[in-house]
Structure formats: C-alpha cells, structure tokens
Image (cartoon, rainbow, N blue to C red):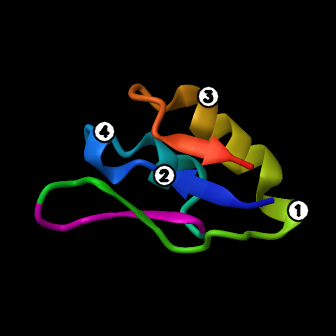
Amino acid sequence: MRIEIDEDLCCGAGTCVLLAPDVFDQNDEDGTVILLDAAPGEEQRAAVEEAAVRCPTAVIRIV
C-alpha cells in the first residue's frame, strides 16, 4: 500500500490524524496534513482506508 495526499486541498479537519496517528500528522501552523509514512504496513490498512473515506476534502489516495 502506498499513500498519496494533496496538501493543497487539505482543510485541516484532522480526522486522518485521529484515525491513523502513525501515518498522518498535522502542520502546527495551518493544520494541514503531513504524511509521516507513505508506505505503511498492512496493519495500518483499515485505519488508512477509513481516514481516506472520512476525509472531508478527499485528499488521501491509496494506490
């Protein structure tokens, strides 16, 4: 699994961080997403998929 994000579209809701804190973080200045791990292990798949589905601006893409 590989993750791509579009930081420019991020609204800073933080849902991704709550669901997968080992994979996502937020920028202290504007709250936008920071990708900590672009290729997390399979144990993170369910959390990352839920984060992608719940992202209000659909910036998370799993490839």
35 or 18: nearer the viewer: 35
What residue is at 22 percent from the left and 54 percent from the top? 31
> Distance from label 3 to label 4 (Cα)?
15 Å
Residue indicated by mark 3: 53
Tell me the quadrant of the picture where the N terminus can be found. Answer: bottom right
Looking at numbered disc 3 in the image, what kind of residue is underneath it? Val
Going by the numbered disc 4, the residue's amino acid type is Leu
Q: Residue lying farthest left?
A: 29
Q: Is residue 9 above or below residue 19?
A: above
Q: Are marks 3 and 1 in contact (CB under 8 Å)?
A: no
Label 2 sits on a secondary structure element that is strand
The residue under label 1 is 42
Of badges 1 and 2, nearer the viewer stands 2
Q: Is residue 46 left or right of residue 52?
A: right
Which one is in front in this view, the residue at disc 3 or the one at disc 4? 4
Q: Nearer the viewer, mark 3 or mark 2?
A: 2
- Which residue in the structure is indicated by mark 4? 9
Distance from label 4 to label 1 (Cα)?
Answer: 26 Å
| Magenta-highlighted residues | 23-29
